[in-house]
Image (cartoon, coloured by chain):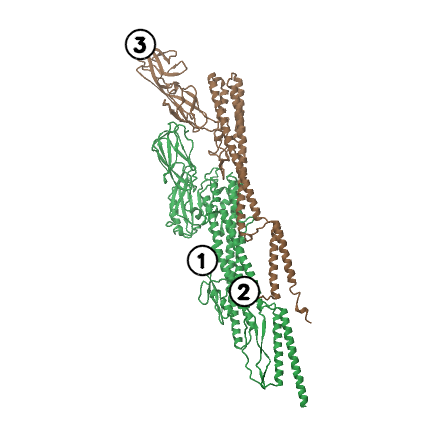
Amino acid sequence: MLKENASPDDVISPQKDSVMTHIDVGISAMRAAQVGLATIANNIANADTDGYHRQRVDLVDRRSIQNQHLWLGGGVDVASITRLRNATVEHALTANLSGKAAAEASLQALSRIEAALTPGPGSIDSLVTDFFDQVEQLALNPSDSVLRREIVATASQLASAINGVTQAFSNAGSASAQEIKETVDKVNSLAENISNLNHSIRIAEARAENPNSLYDQRERLINELAAYVDIDSRSVINGGDPLVAAGGALIVGNARSIISVQETADGRLLLASSTGQKGIEVRSGKLGGLLESMHAVDLGIQADFQEWATSLIREIDTIQATGLSLTGPVRSITGQRSVADINAPLREAGTAFGVESGELSLTVTDASGQRQTHVISVDVTTESLTDFAAKLNAVANVNASVNASTGRLSIHTNPGYAIDFAGRADSAPISSAITGTAVPTLSGRFTGSTNGTWTAEVISGGEVGVTPDVFLQVTDSVSGQVIGQFNVGLGYPANQVIQIGEGINVAFGPGTLNAGDTFDVQVTGTPDETGLLASLGMQTLFIGGDLSHVAVHPDILASPGAFAAAHSSITGDGQQLDRFISLRSKTVGAAGFETFEERLSSIVGSSGILVTTQQQEIDQRDLRIVELENARDAVSGVDPNEELLQMLQFQRAFQAASRFVTSMDESLDELMRLVG
Amino acid sequence: MAIRITPHRQLETGRLYARWHADQSAILTNQIASGVRVHKPSDDPHATKRILDYRAIGSHYAAQSSTIDGVRSILNDAHSQIRSAQQQVVSARDVALQVLRLDDPVAAKAFAQEISATLKSLEVIANTRSNGHYLFSGNELATQPYGDLSVQSDYQGGANSGSIQIAGAGSIKTYYSGDDVFQTGLGGSTVVRGNTGAAGGVGTASGPGRSSLIVEHTTTVYAGASGIQPGSRSPGGDTVIGQTGTHQLQVIDTSGTGSAGTISLNGGDAIAFTSADTDLAITGPNGEIVYVDTTAIAAGFSGTVDFEANGTVSLDGGLTNVPIDFSQTQTLVDEQGNVRHLDTRGIDRSGIDTVSMTGNSDIFETLRSLRDDLLNFESFTTVEWTEAVGQHLNALNHSHDHLLDIVGEQSVDLQTLDRLQERGNELKFEAEKVLAELEGTDFTEAVLRLQESQNMNQFTLAALANVFQVSILDYLR
């Protein structure tokens, strides 16, 4: 325990003993008791005052008075009125109050995120599950208009839910930003008050006044400030003048520095001090909590959610873009997502999603139903949207253009032609060196995942369906791996479809095949390796360039038949649905072991962990604060019973001194009578 | 150091604990009232993740079960229809067996009507709809697969069966292609019935169906120095076809100047000719006819004249006439795109034959052929009749077996689906059980904890009420 404002010993000159001297001793005792009673009264009055430190009267005996050869006591003096305070505990308490305020601020911000992600009817997790379930059910009956409408409606709700969560992140950020600005104002205001108080305290101390109430007031302000920013421990232990806070950026003595909020180009908030310090790191307090939660949300859960939602939309849109609706290929497609710079290389052009160099399959179907697939190579590091449009334009009967003002791509075909990006096998081989009379016809859909070319070679020739052992060998042109050998000689009914493998079929009409005859088959497992279709919003399910404005394409919303369940325009074809269904089990994220649903549940769980962590922090701080407040009040707290007992003590002292003075007065009266 | 506790601190501490107890009671009350333990992620973040995972799993199994129900419903409907079709084939086979020894044309017509009725029943079966879709239209769900089957069986549905991928079962056929069920053509030998001399050739024929082989004469070229020439009606009018040596004319110049004599075909009756005949019809012993021009018969020629009679064959009703190459394998394509391999070496006359394929399981075609044969019963010899009906019986047996194969395939699929659904239901039940454990309130524990919390709250409040019970004020006077 420290005594504050202990006054120096009075230097009393030796005096001669006299009656008046004795009366003075009694009066000193009465005065001391009176001061004691007044102090007790003040203690009792402030027993419930937050931040009040109980005060104690420090009494000292006066210098002795010489009487002949004897030295008699000179009475009592009030040396000082001391505030009882444990500085170490006070500092720990301040630090914990600051920490709790930080956790509370974080909790408030994170709770908003948790609320947006909380599972329930119509929540984003249930909509994702519903979407996949409904897609699986549609596979049974791909042309079912009711199921299609249901899927499109669920997709629309999913888009709204993604918008909602994104908006919740944005709102949480805005609210935190606003709170940060308000908190900085409050910090500056408190700093000014403390500075003014320091000034008053210094004057009082210079005048040898006892500024205990000012000390309490300053400590209350410091604790109030600690609720907003961190406070340097040494400055608290040293009494708070000068006070160092906010990571050293806030220095409050007679003068003070000022904190300001600055916004960076990318919308981040930075704190700066009038001392010139920038990028202040506030370690605790509400301001610290707000900054930390913003950081945690931005880089953590918000980034995770954005990555998840972006991946989901991109994957769904890619499947939709590379499938066919009930009406089959289309004559015109207009992109629903724009690029910022149509002349910049696509990778830097500001596309909605990331794009990669690779191949894109564009199939042109003529009026007779004959298809021809064109494989377009795109180098996103050098080619712009305009360059890409030029490549599309090079395809016969296809016209592509870029709207410079909207940054969107449009494709339309000449009359009698239609396009799609499904990457279906051509009706005829892409190249043929057949010298015989038999004509091969291709059909089916490649079920593999890579793009390439298969070469079919006649190993032994003859007449189809007649000559024994007319063998055809199919080889992967890239790997050289033999896909299979097929006998189209005797025993093969001409025109019967043979399944070569991985969904590709071939049939031979009657005629001859000669040994060495070859033809090539284009196999397309990934019609769009570039990701451009989804990025440009070409025939996609969702539209909108950012997650806060995602919606289902209005054409699909109006006509669910446009949902690309098929890989052909056959009503019962649900082959594209297999890709949607496969998407359900596809792993996502950097770790790559979670499905879309599992990843989302991890994100939702993470939001709970963030909140729980802050809640636990608050609970722990609460317990610590209770302990520290107990420790503080063990020294500084007022116990009325204790004070009343003290009061009795001073009361008796006063009565005794009063009695003594009365006795001395009566003695003087006796003396006066002797004289008189 | 014994800590010094002031009444103020006692109150503050008590108030804090009282608040905690009240909070805890509120949480537990909420859990008990709702029956749900986890209302928001922060209630139990780890459990939240597992709850969402299990909800997705449960929902997935439910969706899969619903899909399996749908597939089973379609397969059961198709199964039932195919069984009916099989019964129709059995009754048609019974008819075929009965008519094998038929000798009454009137009865034949009655049997023909019975077959027509069977054909009509099969038409209804083949065009059956289930849940708004044709059961036997393959992946063209909305397209009626067949028209009037009494005339032709031109399948309009999808070439491929409708199928669905089910995890654990792979691809399951749902809507079968009518082609696969009723008209499967596995490939076989070409069978020709008729009098032209054409026969099945070497090679694998494709596709079901029966088509007419039209053999027509085009030109006749006479060998040697007889001076005989084709008559003006000869192109297309001669009924003989064949390479040199197949047919012969016997010419006897009775005048010695070539102005008159007799001619016979293939040893048939001799007919008198004169040098004025430009288009003389000569009929052979089997009714075959050639038209000749005898205006330039070599004087004194008497002897045998070989000739070559060329012709064409067509399987598409005459749209495409292919010159006969008199080979062991001449490949033709009929109107349906079916490929037939003919042995045309033996063609010796024009006419119309019927071409089909062994292994043909086109039920409709078989029944139509049987019906037509019954209606034309009188045109058959006993041998031909027995052969024709035997062929129909074989085809019906083949169709019957094929339908049983389809039924078997469906049964296997249904069995697989049953097992899968059973397994799915077990897993769904397990998921729901785990979900209930994770999500649901443990009422026993919750109620006990609530009671404990309320007790603690009562104790706290009671203790707080006693903080100022003892005071020095009570003793001060």
Q: Name the disc covering residue A93, or none.
A: 2
Asked whether A241 or A430 is in front, the reply is A241
- The chain under label 3 reads B
Q: Secondary structure at mark 2?
A: helix
Asked whether A665 or B277 is in front, the reply is A665
Q: Secondary structure at mark 3?
A: loop
Say whether mark 3 and mark 2 are on the same chain: no
Q: Amino acid at mark 2?
A: Leu
Is residue A639 toward the left or the right of residue A297 in the image?
right
Give above or below for A606 relative to A241. Answer: above
The residue depicted at 57 percent of the width and 81 percent of the height is A63
**Is residue B277 at all visible to an observer of this figure?**
no
Per the rendering, the colour in which chain A appears is green
- The chain under label 2 reads A
Per the rendering, the colour in which chain B appears is brown
* CB contact under 8 Å: marks 2 and 3: no
- Residue B307 position, x and y percent, is 34, 17
Q: Nearer the viewer, mark 1 or mark 3?
A: 1
Q: Name the disc covering residue B256, or none.
A: 3
- Residue A669 position, x and y percent, is 67, 86
Give above or below for B24 relative to B414. Answer: below
Q: CA distance from mark 1 to mark 3?
A: 121 Å
Mark 1, residue position: A266
Asked whether B307 or B21 is in front, the reply is B21
Q: CA distance from mark 2 to mark 1?
A: 37 Å
Q: Residues within 10 Å of mark 3 (few under 14, many from 20)?
A: some
Quadrant of the image containing the C terminus of chain A:
bottom right
Q: Nearer the viewer, mark 2 or mark 3?
A: 2
Q: Secondary structure at mark 1?
A: loop
Q: Amino acid at mark 3?
A: Gly
> In the orientation shown, which residue stands out farthest toward the bottom?
A676
- Residue A73 position, x and y percent, is 59, 81
